[in-house]
Image (spheres, coloured by chain):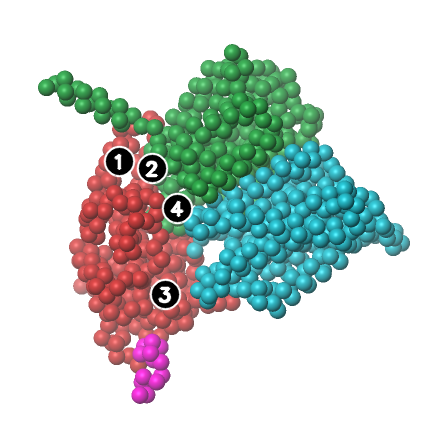
Chain colours: A cyan, B red, C green
């Protein structure tokens, strides 16, 4: 392969990875606090992506407001998801499987809503939303939308780190991630902290939805990309948001190379086989994360 | 005559990443003997128990049970060989009745294959009946005779602890591992518990390895005690010896008391 | 009349798949997103063997089930030791891989366009008797110590392990049997509706079955069967499109889990005991 082609692939991979990183971090945030996998994050992402699309297409809003629409939609929807799908189970101290059922159900529900409203076809954000489409550096083309993703990810991530380390609510979220019971025993209103975590997660989801929608195209199944966020969370070591972000970027690069070598058709098969090999070789975890439920 | 050693723990070490939970522990349990492992919280006592019951493999060292090295076996295999345990934070099958919970301990002994379930229904029924009788017997033994058909999660904590013990007994073990059996109980409940354990020990000729951080439980029951602190063994001896050992007193109560 | 019978057969066949999920997810708490993939495998394997290779229907079904069981061994072995959410992810990946495989092997399977003109070999008798046998099988399974072990493992796997239950082996058995159920249902369905396409057998179908199990009540076999009939028949009666049907399922299950988490039927089971008691007391009366 020519060097410039490889470089192009790496650039594409990094751009895709940046979007994945946003998705993964939004997902991992809830995982850290509530200790379960919030598949509904994909649904939040999908609806927000379409909300941004409506803002851009029908209301002809420019880029920044469109992104804001996405983020606000995401935040509101995420809170609704927590209230409808998780709060009751948590208060009843329900078993883990119930959380899985409701979170997957919410993902499915939101996807069906999109199918009903928009049909099964693809949509695209208006071309005029981003003025310059590509930047050229010699043989390498960088899509401006991907660059946008990269920059947004860096800003969002830095913002998140700041909030988590320096603000009161951020510290409360970190405390809750560590030990929910202890946090509540210290007089902190855990329900509000959880809502705050969902708001942040929802904003990240909304942002990633809009950015992904702009970079690629929109279809009701867009929410399923949350799986990438899940995989990145696993590989990056649940508990470390930086690790998750890095793993997501690596995942993006790997995926671009995989698709360019064997095509997008068979890549799910290869990915699954890789997963199996991974599990067989290291069944006890990766980067300090235990794969088993026990003890 | 010298009693035979039933469980021999040699140089047991367990490391979790950088943390060394158990550091080179050597000890043994003899036939028909109650031994105790005590120490402040975090001393690694439960980890020793977890290694013996197969929940994690030791990083180093061996565990010999009746002449066989069990350190790499799975918990269910160790159970089949004759070791049963209770858990510090009760692990029961909350939605089942007490009887059903205890009957699960006999499940592995079922004399029928999965596919035979439909072919030999009489065999299934007979096994169920025999098991039920044995379990009712264990329920009586721990003093829960009236509660056989109560749902486990409806019982008060003290009774749930007894269900834990009955369930361990239902494995018909040679060795019983008790992990902080007195946790969460009040003084009079502890008193009853100690009597119960003493009674079971005498009647069933068990060997018992008992973990606790409460002195009163250990002192009354154990013949020999190992004292752990931060993963290391700092002392061992009879209850009288341990009570007077300055190293033990220091670990539990701190420097000031000695010098006071 | 034939329309109603056709619908009834579809419901009966789908119920067989739901019973597989009942054992796997309901009784054992294993949240698999890849059950539908086994149905797809069963459907396609049987269809290809009969239509392309002229094998007799019963033999093709057996081979398809054997194939599904073998695959289930492989997938189960790799994935059953890991924590529940990763297991969901792994089975999701498996489902996606199966769909991709069925789509890409265009020359054998017809690809995304599907495989059509499958002869209608599934008679009403075959469908209903299969369902009856499946129900009997699950009933027997639950009554035996395997059923009790399932509940133990679901409640507290570690406690079950220290009591001598080989949890991994148990889960493997359940996973393989459930795959067999799904594959068999797939075979029957393919030869009933005469057409199969890969996209049908994704995680959404798997989740639909899980919803049906939790709707009826994961602790009630009767509840699951009745729940399956209700949830599968209603959309036909109300003529919902697929998306609306799934949406309604989602809303229903969210209501159930929040308001009645044990499911519509809780732990209730249909039982012959009241009838037996009635006849016994009648006999005693007549004896006097």
Q: CA distance from mark 4 to mark 3?
A: 26 Å
Quadrant showing the C terminus of chain B: bottom left
Q: Which mark is residue B45?
A: 3
- The chain that hosts pointer 4 is C
CB under 8 Å between discs 2 and 1:
yes
Q: Is residue C66 visible?
A: no
Q: Residues within 10 Å of mark 1 (few under 14, many from 20)?
A: some
Instruction: Please report the residue visible at 37 percent of the width from the left and 32 percent of the height from the top.
Output: C141
Q: CA distance from mark 4 to mark 1?
A: 23 Å
Q: Which residues are magenta?
A: B248-260
- The chain that hosts pointer 2 is C
Q: Which mark is residue C155?
A: 4
Decide if residue A267 is on the left or right side of residue B66.
Answer: right
CB under 8 Å between discs 1 and 3:
no
Q: CA distance from mark 3 to mark 2?
A: 34 Å
Q: Residues within 10 Å of mark 2 (few under 14, many from 20)?
A: many
């Amino acid at each position: 392969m020519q060097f410039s082609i490889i470089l192009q692939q790496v650039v594409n991979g990094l751009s895709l990875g940046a979007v994945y990183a946003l998705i993964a971090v939004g997902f991992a945030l809830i995982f850290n606090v509530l200790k379960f996998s919030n598949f509904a994050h994909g649904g939040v992402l999908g609806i927000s992506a379409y909300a941004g699309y409506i803002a851009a297409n029908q209301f002809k809003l420019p880029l920044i407001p469109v992104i804001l629409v996405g983020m606000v939609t995401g935040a509101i929807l995420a809170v609704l998801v927590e209230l409808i799908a998780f709060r009751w189970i948590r208060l009843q101290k329900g078993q883990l499987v119930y959380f899985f059922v409701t979170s997957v159900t919410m993902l499915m529900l939101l996807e069906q809503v999109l199918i009903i409203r928009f049909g099964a076809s693809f949509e695209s954000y208006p071309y005029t939303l981003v003025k310059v489409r590509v930047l050229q550096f010699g043989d390498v083309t960088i899509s401006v939308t991907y660059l946008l993703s990269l920059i947004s990810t860096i800003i969002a991530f830095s913002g998140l780190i700041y909030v988590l380390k320096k603000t009161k609510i951020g510290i409360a979220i970190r405390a809750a991630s560590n030990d929910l019971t202890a946090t509540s025993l210290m007089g902190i209103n855990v329900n509000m902290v959880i809502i705050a975590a969902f708001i942040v997660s929802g904003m990240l989801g909304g942002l990633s939805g809009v950015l992904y929608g702009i970079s690629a195209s929109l279809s009701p199944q867009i929410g399923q990309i949350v799986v990438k966020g899940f995989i990145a969370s696993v590989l990056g070591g649940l508990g470390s948001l930086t690790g998750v972000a890095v793993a997501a970027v690596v995942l993006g690069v790997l995926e671009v190379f995989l698709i360019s070598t064997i095509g997008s058709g068979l890549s799910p098969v290869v990915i699954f086989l890789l997963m199996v090999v991974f599990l067989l070789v290291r069944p006890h975890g990766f980067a300090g994360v235990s794969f088993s439920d026990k003890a | 005559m010298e009693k035979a050693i039933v469980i021999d723990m040699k140089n047991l070490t367990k490391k979790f990443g950088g943390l060394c939970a158990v550091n080179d522990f050597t000890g043994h349990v003899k036939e028909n003997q109650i031994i105790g492992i005590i120490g402040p919280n975090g001393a690694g006592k439960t980890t020793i128990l977890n290694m013996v019951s197969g929940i994690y493999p030791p990083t180093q060292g061996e565990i010999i049970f009746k002449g066989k090295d069990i350190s790499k076996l799975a918990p269910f295999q160790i159970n089949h060989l004759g070791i049963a345990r209770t858990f510090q934070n009760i692990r029961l099958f909350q939605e089942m009745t007490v009887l059903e919970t205890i009957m699960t301990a006999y499940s592995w002994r079922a004399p029928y294959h999965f596919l035979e379930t439909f072919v030999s229904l009489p065999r299934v029924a007979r096994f169920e009946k025999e098991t039920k009788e044995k379990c009712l017997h264990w329920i009586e033994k721990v003093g829960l005779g009236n509660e056989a058909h109560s749902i486990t999660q409806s019982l008060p904590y003290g009774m749930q602890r007894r269900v834990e013990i009955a369930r361990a007994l239902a494995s018909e073990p040679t060795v019983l591992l008790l992990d902080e059996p007195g946790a969460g109980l009040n003084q009079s409940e502890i008193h009853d518990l100690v009597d119960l354990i003493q009674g079971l020990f005498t009647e069933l000729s068990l060997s018992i390895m008992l973990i606790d951080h409460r002195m009163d439980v250990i002192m009354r029951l154990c013949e020999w005690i190992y004292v752990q602190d931060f993963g290391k063994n700092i002392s061992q001896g009879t209850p009288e010896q341990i009570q007077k050992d300055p190293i033990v007193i220091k670990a539990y109560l701190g420097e000031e008391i000695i010098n006071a | 009349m034939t329309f109603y019978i056709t619908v009834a057969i579809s419901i009966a066949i789908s119920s067989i798949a739901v019973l597989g999920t009942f054992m796997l997810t309901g009784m054992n708490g294993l949240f698999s997103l890849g059950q539908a993939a086994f149905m797809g495998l069963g459907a396609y394997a049987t269809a290809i063997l009969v239509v392309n290779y002229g094998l007799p229907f019963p033999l093709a079904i057996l081979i398809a089930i054997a194939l599904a069981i073998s695959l289930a061994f492989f997938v189960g072995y790799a994935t059953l030791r890991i924590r529940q959410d990763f297991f969901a992810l792994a089975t999701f990946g498996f489902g996606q891989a199966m769909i991709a495989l069925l789509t890409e092997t265009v020359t054998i399977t017809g690809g995304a366009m599907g495989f059509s003109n499958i002869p209608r070999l599934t008679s009403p008798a075959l469908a209903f008797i299969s369902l009856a046998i499946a129900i009997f099988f699950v009933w027997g399974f639950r009554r035996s110590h395997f059923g009790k072990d399932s509940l133990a493992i679901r409640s507290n796997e570690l406690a079950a392990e220290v009591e001598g239950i080989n949890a991994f082996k148990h889960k493997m058995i359940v996973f393989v049997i459930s795959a067999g159920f799904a594959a068999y249902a797939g075979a029957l369905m393919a030869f009933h509706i005469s057409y199969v396409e890969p996209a049908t057998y994704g995680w959404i179908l798997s989740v639909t079955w899980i919803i049906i199990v939790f709707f009826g009540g994961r602790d009630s076999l009767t509840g699951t069967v009745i729940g399956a009939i209700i949830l599968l028949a209603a959309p036909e009666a109300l003529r919902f499109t697929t998306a609306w049907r799934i949406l309604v399922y989602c809303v229903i299950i969210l209501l159930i889990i929040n308001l009645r988490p044990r499911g519509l039927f809780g732990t209730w089971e249909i039982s012959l005991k009241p009838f037996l008691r009635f006849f016994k007391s009648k006999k005693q009366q007549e004896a006097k």
